[in-house]
Amino acid sequence: MAPPQGSRAPLEFGGPLGAAALMLLLPVTMFHLLLVARSGPARLLGPPPYLPGLEELWSPWALLLCLTWLGLQAALYLLPARKVAEGQELKDKSRLRYPINGFQALVLTALLVGLGVSAGLPLSALPEMLLPLAFAATLTAFIFSLLLYLKALVAPASALAPGGNSGNLIYDFFLGRELNPRICSFDFKYFCELRPGLIGWVLINLALLMQEAELRGSPSLAMWLVNGFQLLYVADALWYEEAVLTTMDIIHDGFGFMLAFGDLAWVPFTYSLQAQFLLYHPQPLGWPLASFICLINAVGYYIFRGANSQKNTFRKNPSDPRVADLETISTATGRRLLVSGWWGMVRHPNYLGDLIMALAWSLPCGVFHLLPYFYFLYFTALLVHREDRDERQCLQKYGLAWHEYCQRVPYRIVPYVY
């Protein structure tokens, strides 16, 4: 049974109507991007060149490949981990345990792909299958979300997410009713959060690079930059995998269609948009401009990694010499808020680094098309919305201490701008 209405979180994303609209809009947007990326005009805001029929979208081989990929990543998840970490304390005072072996999965996947390519695996043919693969991933996400919803119907009240038990079927299906759905020790949300989507993203990028090499003799400098920047981002996420245990996705959001579709379909097929664009619309890029773009990415990564490492170090051990001298604010919960260092510059410095890197990923695609900048525009909207959700949760959790923090650190993401 769901907890009484008074203990439920307020509805987000526009409630049931907003959730229904997003379940339609997100897949449509993903397929629109896939279609226009390969079209001649490549117009983000224009209509797609054509509407594919079911015979072009549906492929049993694509579905088999999608399920095989998920099976491979699940097998790698179950391998012995270099570390097992405990998550945040749950409502019943227990803590779940999570294997920290995402980077290991990335390395083993790279080895397997390398062996496959050397044995004749036609990886460069993957870009021609992006439409049916995206359709298979979307279908998988819908079915998976339905099974998660049914599982949550028999879950105890203590296992439900704060916001996914509104009583409205559409809203709860979208947001996710159960916070940490598991079978034995296999945590579905934690598994999907970083592994199949992020590793699939860099694999699609690699396939696009290889196809460009076949078409033009060698990959372009722009393609190398996009692949390198995004591989660094994915490798960083998996190397610091333990940090995901304190994110909003893990500790607050249930596991429903929003995260399932995002992890399994949206990330690999939308985040690879720059590489898709470059395959069909090659862009000249000289070394001086490439060096400047690398500097922009390096600055973004420095801010992103520095802010996240400082936060994670402080959470683990506030007495650590690296953070012991930082100024803090006491809260009624017993925890302390950092008010100096990176977190004294803006309230979400990691988001600032994220946005600078997002811009660097788009710049190799030139400035004459808006399409490759979709990720930057979308990510800006996503982070502003996420920051607003985070602010409301922090205000509820820390009260007057959060008001004081906001007065001390008035800017949210961009200093002197926002």
Image: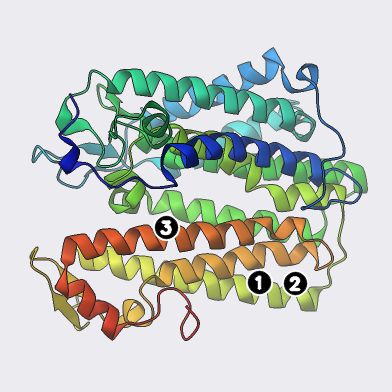
State the separation of the CA atoms marked 1 and 2: 6 Å
Residue at the image point whose x is 76% and y is 26% from the top: 120
Is 341 located above or below residue 395 in the figure? below
Q: What residue type is labelled 3?
A: Arg
Crowdedness near tag 1: few (<14), some (14–19) or many (≥20) residues, C-alpha within 10 Å = some
The furthest residue to the top: 60
* Quadrant hosting residue 150: top left
Residue at the image point whose x is 51% and y is 65% from the top: 354
Q: Is residue 412 visible?
A: yes
Numbered badge on residue 290: 2
* Quadrant hosting residue 224: bottom right
Between disc 3 and disc 1, the foreground one is 3
Judge by depth and name the residue closer to the eye, 21 or 108: 21
Mark 1 = which residue?
A: 294
Residue 38, x across and y down, in percent = 84, 43
Numbered badge on residue 410: none
Q: What residue type is labelled 2?
A: Ala
Q: Give the mark nearer the N terminus: 2 vs 3.
A: 2
Judge by depth and name the residue closer to the eye, 284 or 121: 284
Labels 1 and 2 touching (C-beta < 8 A)? yes
Between disc 2 and disc 3, the foreground one is 3
Label 3's element? helix
Is 81 located above or below residue 315 in the figure? above
